[in-house]
Image: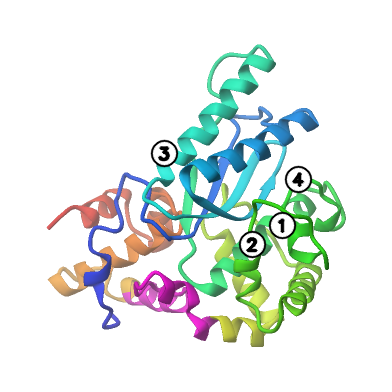
């Protein structure tokens, strides 16, 4: 186990609650129930964007990227206060209420509570943004993300983007060079990433990590720079694992799976907490670490 300053993350992670810590960037995904649609007409998309703007102002959220698909939503955001859960409840409940009234339907519009993954390092955040913008292409809706109307891609790639409540400059700022140069680099990443294999987060808990590794092979210099930069972790003053470090800890976990010492138990719990922060569900963690769900819950119990 690496010698990490774990005192900085005591009680940050919870086994059953969403992480609402201020200034942490979250990738939020929310899906419709079953095969239902979230958006039927253009006005539905427009209302969600209007509502997202109002909620972001009310709850002091910074919105970095989004993609509204017919049956699910992707958001990249950072709360300035510890109110992310309240903000998302406000957003999705108000949208569902209006949708149900408009289409005279009853029941839950969304299939389950929203999924949250913390963007804990610069490379992961960039990969998450690219992943979000690639969704319409992966769904076969268009040939290029720039053709899709209901995402923030044009704010990232247009030389002179329109004014918006969405703030792409934070993610563009992760890339080297001026803003105009960063936009060209981002578009290059998008173009080269079109043929990169793509899995849905709802089906593969580590879909973005896989996408990140594949993009890193295409752009090793960019992602090597991001791995060293640590802009996000420095800005929140917390020592969280990047993807490569997490993989090393998972190897340690597997090699000491049957050890019962206090040190290895602490190390195992830390790995599970890191996976929870990345949006993994308990059964996905059990599968990834080749342990039972009961073991996952036992390791998360307070000592």
Tell me what residue is drawn at x 56 percent, y 81 percent: 226
Q: Which mark is residue 133?
A: 1
Q: CA distance from mark 1 to mark 2?
A: 6 Å
Under circle 2, the secondary element is helix
User: Is 199 rendered above or below residue 258?
Assistant: above
Labels 1 and 2 touching (C-beta < 8 A): yes
Q: Which residue has dot 2 on it? A: 129
Tell me what residue is drawn at x 48 percent, y 60 percent: 25
User: Is 66 rendered above or below residue 182?
Assistant: above
Labels 3 and 4 touching (C-beta < 8 A): no
The magenta span reads 227-252
Q: Is residue 280 left or right of residue 203?
A: left
Q: Which residue has dot 3 on it? A: 86
Foreground tag (3 vs 4)? 3
Q: Is residue 186 visible?
A: yes
Q: Position of residue 277 (x, y in %)?
A: 40, 58
The 10 Å Cα crowd at callout 4, few under 14, some 14 to 19, many 20 or more, is many
Q: Earlier in the sequence, mark 3 or mark 4?
A: 3
Q: Is residue 261 visible?
A: no
In the rendered image, the quadrant that contains the N terminus is bottom left
Labels 3 and 1 touching (C-beta < 8 A): no
Q: Which residue has dot 4 on it? A: 150
Q: Is residue 158 left or right of residue 257?
A: right
Q: Position of residue 180 (x, y in %)?
A: 77, 76
Foreground tag (1 vs 4)? 4
The image quadrant that residue 204 belongs to is: bottom right
The 10 Å Cα crowd at callout 1, few under 14, some 14 to 19, many 20 or more, is many
The image quadrant that residue 185 belongs to is: bottom right
User: Is 110 rendered above or below residue 185?
Assistant: above
């Amino acid at each position: 186990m690496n010698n990490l300053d774990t005192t900085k993350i005591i009680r940050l992670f919870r086994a059953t609650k969403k992480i609402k810590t201020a200034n942490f960037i979250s990738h939020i995904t929310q899906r419709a129930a079953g095969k239902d649609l979230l958006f039927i007409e253009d006005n539905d998309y427009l209302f969600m964007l209007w509502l997202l703007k109002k909620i972001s102002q009310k709850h002091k959220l910074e919105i970095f990227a989004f993609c509204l698909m017919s049956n699910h939503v992707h958001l990249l955001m950072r709360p300035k206060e510890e109110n992310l859960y309240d903000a998302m409840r406000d957003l999705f409940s108000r949208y569902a209420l209006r949708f149900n009234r408009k289409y005279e339907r009853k029941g839950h519009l969304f299939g389950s509570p929203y999924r949250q993954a913390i963007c804990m390092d610069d490379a992961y955040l960039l990969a998450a943004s690219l992943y979000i913008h690639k969704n319409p292409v992966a769904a076969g809706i268009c040939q290029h993300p720039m053709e899709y109307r209901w995402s923030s891609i044009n704010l990232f790639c247009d030389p002179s983007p329109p004014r918006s409540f969405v703030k792409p400059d934070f993610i563009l700022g992760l890339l080297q060079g001026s803003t105009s140069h960063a936009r060209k680099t981002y578009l290059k990443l998008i173009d080269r990433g079109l043929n990169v294999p793509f899995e849905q987060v709802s089906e593969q808990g580590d879909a973005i990590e896989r996408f990140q590794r594949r993009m890193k092979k295409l752009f090793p210099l960019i992602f090597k720079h991001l791995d060293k930069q640590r802009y996000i972790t420095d800005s929140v003053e917390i020592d969280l694992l990047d993807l490569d470090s997490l993989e090393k800890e998972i190897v340690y976990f597997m090699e000491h799976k049957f050890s019962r010492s206090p040190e290895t138990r602490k190390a195992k719990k830390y790995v599970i907490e890191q996976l929870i922060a990345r949006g993994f569900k308990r059964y996905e963690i059990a599968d990834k670490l080749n342990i039972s769900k009961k073991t996952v819950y036992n390791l998360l119990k307070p000592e």
